[in-house]
Image (cartoon, grey):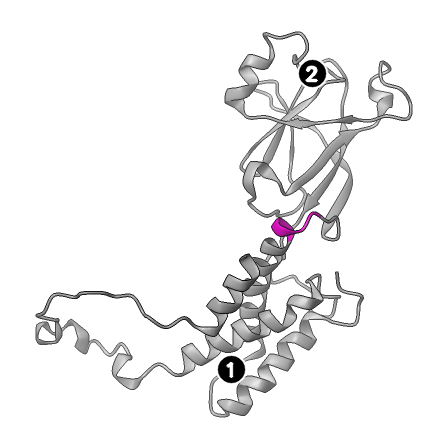
Amino acid sequence: MSDGSTTIRMVVFDLLGDLKQVYSGAALTPFKVYYWVMIFADRLRKLHIEKIDSGAYVHRFNNVPVLVDPVSGRNYFELPAGIYDMDKDGAIDYITYPPEYDLSLPMFASATFTRTTPAKAKRLYYREDEKPSPSNVYVYRQNKYIYLLGVEEINLTKIEVALKTSLAPASLDTNIDEPFEFPQDLIPILKRQILDIGRFVMQIPADLVNDGAAWDSKNFPTQKIASVNDPDTTNSQRYQQQYEQ
């Protein structure tokens, strides 16, 4: 995690300077580079979190309100932040509530929810050792809503949630002067990938510019295309392959 010495602004303007040294006449803006930084950083950060079992990028949210669906009567809450889409909802680190809601729990313990799915949850009610209860609670996700099973008998109003949040690359509210929550050792890979995409965007040959001429029937290929695969592997792909191994 960033120690506060690196900010998004520093990364953006470092890359902007490098790109303008090579493409001095290019119409580059800090916002365009910022967008590239956040998109690529979000992907690399997700890969990093999936590979390494660490709590470095886990954020805890206290007092998340629990609501009741007026139609189904199910208890649920809305995710307080955007999270990564990981296998088996792995971006939800834990969901818990304090023992004062259930006097059967020892005071030093808290009830932690176990993940399930709507299809699997149906069979839980047929086994006494698995049946949802205040001390044996389950959770399943549907879009941005998290449904809670086993808490129907208690007046549960708030819970504690720990999430592996994303960088929210589409958000315009990000403060670029805040510490960049991105692995410092991956910044060179991030920079390399953005320089590659910059080179790709700004070196498109003139004959590939979309001026409408390509729709002329005489420009359509008349021979069978044997392959559309590029035999070369870009630098960013090599970096990515090394990182994903």
Q: Can residue 170 be seen in this view?
A: no
Q: Please give the name of the residue rendered at 76% of the width and 30% of the height, measured from the top-left corner.
A: 96
Left or right of 226 on screen, residue 5: right
Q: What residue type is labelled 2?
A: Glu
**Alpha carbons under labels 2 and 1: distance apart:** 55 Å
* Mark 1: secondary structure: loop
| Closer-to-camera residue (186/206) | 186
Q: Does the magenta stretch include residue 138?
A: no
Q: What residue type is labelled 1?
A: Leu
Q: Please give the name of the residue rendered at 76% of the width and 64% of the height, measured from the top-left corner.
A: 2
The x and y percentages for residue 211 are: 24, 79
Q: Is residue 29 visible?
A: yes
Left or right of 230 on screen, residue 86: right
Residue position marked by numbered label 2 in the rendering: 152
| Closer-to-camera residue (3/228) | 228
Q: Is residue 133 above or below residue 224?
A: above
Q: Locate the N terminus by quadrant.
A: bottom right
Q: Please give the name of the residue rendered at 54% of the width and 80% of the height, measured from the top-left corner.
A: 29
Give, as a single range, the part of the protein colored magenta: 49-53
Left or right of 214 on screen, residue 143: right
Q: Which of marks 2 and 1 is nearer the N terminus?
A: 1
Q: Please give the name of the residue rendered at 52% of the width and 71% of the height, measured from the top-left corner.
A: 193
Left or right of 137 on screen, residue 241: left
| Closer-to-camera residue (188/136) | 188
Q: What crowding class fits label 1: few (fewer than 14 Cα within 10 Å), some (14-19), or many (20 or more)?
A: some
Q: Is residue 130 above or below residue 88?
A: above
Residue position marked by numbered label 1 in the rendering: 28
Q: Is residue 218 above or below residue 166?
A: below
